[in-house]
Amino acid sequence: NSNRSTGPTGALHDSAFLRACRGEAVPHTPVWFMRQAGRSLPEYLKVREGIAMLDSCMMPELVKEITLQPVRRHQVDAAIYFSDIVVPLKAIGVDLDIKPGVGPVVANPIRDRAGLAQLRALEPDDVSYVTEAIGLLVAELGATPLIGFAGAPYTLASYLVEGGPSKNHENTKALMYGDPELWQELLDRLSGITAAFLKVQIEAGASAVQLFDSWVGALAPDDYRRSVMPASAKVFEAVAGYGVPRIHFGVGTGELLGLMGDAGADVVGVDWRVPLDEAARRVAPGKALQGNLDPTLLFAPEAVVRAKADEVLAAAKASGRGHIFNLGHGVLPSTDPDALTKLVAHVHERSAV
Ligand code: 1CP
């Protein structure tokens, strides 16, 4: 364990994205989009042809190309490492696949103590392709920050327990309420795996990390505080010493924003349901905010997108917090990429000081 307080230096350290994460003044509001790489881009569909999603995540040159595509095309202020939240689980030998049009599917869902045996600790050597790809990327990206990421314990648990994508998380919640001891053990193992996976990415050169707890909005605050927050807090604590910003995001988490910040995030991601000035009243002082244009708005006329983006910028300004412009969730696959390029230019222009 080498919890060095390295962190980026020079032009990278002074990039608009990293400055905003730290709550410092910026020349313009930085922009990136969750799921900015991927199916909305024809150049992505082209390079992915005939290659399965999980296989692509293990091919460093391909990962480099896919990660750079949205940076070239949209001029976003940060790259996000191309991978998936289930990659570290695959790397430790969990029998799972990403099915096109569905998402992650787990062969033997974890519903009892015996199922836990599928989850051993993650060693850096299990994901040497990640270290290699990030090395290639940071050499190419220069002063553009690379965001590493991982799935948070609750969201990973939801796939492992349900066996795939789920609307109501009934098996996951039944386990959480019905066998708290087994649940704690499951989340504990996942926090170890997630922390190890984020460390690999930071040590390879990622200059920020985002913990995706995409589906934790399914929980009431008391249940989150009791049954999930300690595991997420362990992940943030494990990477605290590196001095890289830690972003925490989930969907439908309006009632959890304060707790998700308190779990140890430097930046709290907000979906489109809560305006950023209201989010600031829910999140402890000193933390920056990320978000939060509704991704479906990109299907509306350009003038509407601009007006709504201006509302997001105004709410962010009123919040007094550092602000990273993003969507309230990922880019939808059928989004017109030109609408994204225009949105980046608009936010940059409107926020320039
Ligand atoms: O640029 C980018 O951001 C793309 C990289 C990326 C990221 C950040 C991918 C590639 N996946 C993820 C994270 C991820 N994966 C999350 C958290 C972010 C979020 O909330 O959107 C989640 C919940 C997943 C799980 C997952 N993987 C789903 C969702 C299924 C569900 O429960 O509804 C899906 C569809 C996948 C597959 C996947 N991952 C990534 C891509 C491009 C795809 C599509 C498959 C393909 O192209 O073959």
Image (cartoon, helix red, strand yellow):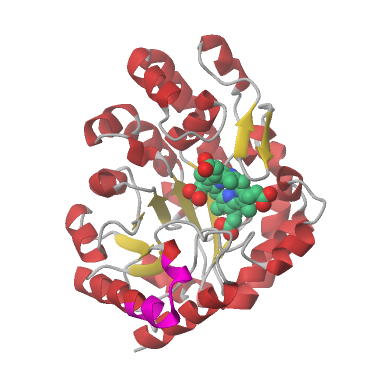
Q: Which residues are magenta?
A: 297-307
In front of the other: 137 or 85: 85
Tell me which secondary structure the magenta stretch mostly adopts: helix
> For the point 61% across and 24% down, which residue is it?
120
Question: Horizontal placement of 271 versus 333: left or right?
Answer: left
Check the image and report above or below for 330 versus 200: below
Q: Considering only vertical position in the picture, is 253 above or below 288?
A: above
Q: Quadrant of residue 42?
A: bottom right
Picture mark count: 0
Q: Is residue 253 magenta?
A: no
Q: Going by the image, does 142 lie left or right of 298?
A: right
- From where the camera sits, is residue 138 visible? no
Residue 287, x across and y down, in percent:
28, 59
- Quarter of the figure that contains the N terminus: top right
Residue farthest toward the right in the current orientation of the protein: 50
Quadrant in the rendering for residue 301: bottom left
Residue at (61% x, 62% y) in the render = 37
Q: Residue at x 53, y 35 (%)?
A: 165
Q: Is residue 265 visible?
A: yes
Q: Is residue 191 above or below residue 83?
A: above
Residue drawn at 35 percent across, 83 percent down: 351
In this rendering, would 247 be left or right of 86? left
In the image, residue 303 sits, relative to residue 220, either above or below, namely below
Q: Quadrant of the C terminus?
A: bottom left
